């Protein structure tokens, strides 16, 4: 397709989840590894982090992601309740954010947020990349 040509990946068959790759990563030790401190180290260098999960994600559930982001977040981050994020006047999810960290729970999405909520996922990425608040 035109998209594959633009990305330079023609001749490859796309698979959403490739079991061979998964097993290779698992046997290499890349399974259930904590990365929370790595995220903190990156944020300490001034890089903003966006951690998101679909509200129906059974692989990376929103409750676990909310818990660890609250653990590593600033006092301001920890003190916040989740606030509504809207796209085109509709609730798209809920978030808490400070200067370097945003946690976002995406409404009506599973593990593949861009597949389940493409318009909202685009809004999420654009807001993060342009440093636009999720309540703007």
Image (cartoon, rainbow, N blue to C red):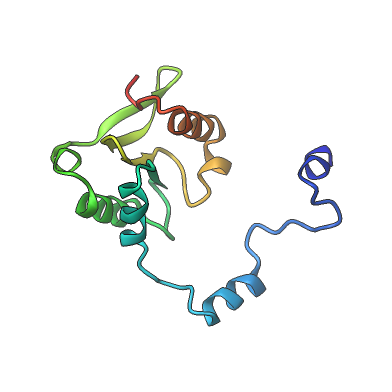
Against 56, is 84 above or below?
above
Q: Where, by quadrant of the figure, is residue 22 drawn?
A: bottom right
Q: Residue furthest front?
A: 45
Q: Residue at coordinates 32% horizontally, 23% vertically from top-left?
A: 135
Q: Position of residue 88 (x, y in %)?
A: 46, 18
Against 5, is 14 above or below?
below
Q: Residue at coordinates 24% horizontally, 54% vertically from top-left?
A: 67
Q: Residue at coordinates 20% horizontally, 54% vertically from top-left?
A: 71
Quadrant location of the C terminus in the rendered image: top left
Q: Is residue 131 left or right of 82 when viewed as pictured?
A: right
Q: Position of residue 62 (x, y in %)?
A: 34, 51
Against 97, is 88 above or below?
above
Count of numbered circles on the image: 0
Q: Position of residue 127 (x, y in %)?
A: 44, 28
Q: Residue at coordinates 62% horizontally, 62% vertically from top-left?
A: 17
Q: Is residue 91 left or right of 72 when viewed as pictured?
A: right
Q: Residue furthest bottom?
A: 27
Viewer-side residue, 4 vs 90 = 4
Q: Where, by quadrant of the figure, is residue 19 drawn?
A: bottom right
Q: Where, by quadrant of the figure, is residue 81 drawn?
A: top left
Quadrant location of the N terminus in the rendered image: top right
Viewer-side residue, 71 vs 113 = 71
Q: Is residue 76 left or right of 39 when viewed as pictured?
A: left
């Amino acid at each position: 397709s035109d998209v594959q040509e633009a990305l330079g990946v023609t001749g490859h068959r796309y698979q959403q989840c490739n079991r061979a790759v998964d097993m290779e990563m698992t046997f290499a030790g890349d399974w259930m590894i904590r990365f929370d401190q790595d995220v903190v180290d990156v944020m300490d260098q001034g890089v903003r982090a966006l951690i998101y999960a679909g509200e129906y994600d059974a692989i990376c559930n929103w409750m676990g992601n909310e818990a660890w982001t609250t653990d590593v977040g600033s006092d301001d981050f920890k003190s916040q309740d989740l606030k509504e994020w809207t796209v085109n006047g509709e609730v798209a999810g809920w978030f808490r954010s400070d200067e370097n960290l945003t946690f976002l729970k995406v409404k009506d999405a599973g593990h593949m947020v861009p597949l389940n909520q493409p318009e909202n996922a685009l809004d999420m990425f654009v807001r993060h990349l342009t440093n636009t608040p999720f309540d703007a």
